[in-house]
Amino acid sequence: MRLQGKVALITGGGTGIGAAVAEAFIGEGARVCIAGRRREVLQKVALRFSDSQCTFCTADVSRLEDVRRMVAATVAFGGKLDIVVNNAAMGVPGSVVDMDVSLWQQVLDTNLTGPFLVLKYAIPHMIRAGGGSIINVASLGAIRGLPNVAAYCAAKAGLLGLSRQVAIDYGPQRIRSNVVLPGAFRSEMFDRRLEETASAAGISVEERLNAMAVPTPLKRVAFPSEIAGLFVYLAGDESAYTTASEFICDAGVHALDASVLAG
């Protein structure tokens, strides 16, 4: 039980990577609060576990009062706070010229200001607990760029800088801050984007999925459970000397020349 006695908060914990990480953490002995905007989705995940293992809190990470309440609910549930996973995200297609300013702001509010707010209220509790681990979820798009998602890539790139800054500022208080950069993992957001790009290309979703997988070294798109072990490692004592670091998990896509991916 690598996380025995730990208390974790996972935003975007109702689906995809967030739900898979919650299951992995609980399997390693942690108590977990999952947060998100949809009560029914969170409740479905929480019902897989006992009341002492998992609770949930409906919250929008872009809203200060929601974040304050979410962090307080986690501490009330577990008595402390050791681990924070900033996983909540949204993606809206659009280039810089095409994107509406209000949509640009919404994406930044969720993907960058949201993690800032979570850490603003979580870090004091983590200091009181004697330290802890922050795992921010960015994207391959933070370092490589993705077509027609300017706001998403910009916000995720900003999250890299925020994570490093937290590592520098709070390392003396035994708080570690690292980033996971996933590639293509099946999730609600990924599947929506998959349908959009397939439609734009005039092909089926399955054809688009295969086209994405074939150029990559591992020749497939992964499931969220396949990345959860990395989060367990970063949350636990095995990574006690690891901070201000970025972990790419993308089937090797980042090692390929862009022309290979373009076909």
Image (tube, rainbow, N blue to C red):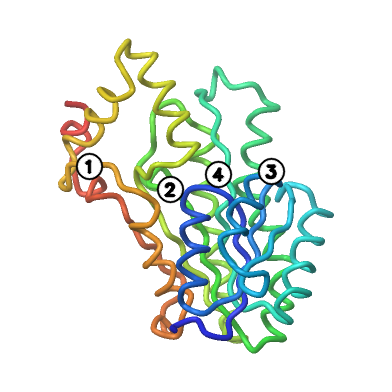
Comparing 48 with 201, the one in front is 48
Please state, as top left, top right, bottom left or bottom right, where the N terminus lies in the image.
Answer: bottom left
**SS label for mark 3:** loop
Q: Residue at x 22, y 42 (%)?
A: 220
For label 1, the crowd category at 10 Å Cα-Cα, with few meaning under 14, some 14 to 19 and many 20 or more, is: some
Q: x and y percent of residue 159 in the render?
A: 54, 54
For label 2, the crowd category at 10 Å Cα-Cα, with few meaning under 14, some 14 to 19 and many 20 or more, is: many
Q: Earlier in the sequence, mark 1 or mark 3?
A: 3
Query: In the displayed structure, does residue 44 sit left or right of residue 263?
Result: right
Read off the residue under disc 3.
38
Foreground disc of the pair 3, 4? 3
Read off the residue under disc 1.
220
Read off the residue under disc 4.
155
Query: In the displayed structure, does residue 229 sit left or right of residue 32?
Result: left
| Residue 191 picture quarter | top left
Read off the residue under disc 2.
139
Alpha carbons under labels 1 and 2: distance apart = 17 Å
Foreground disc of the pair 3, 2? 3
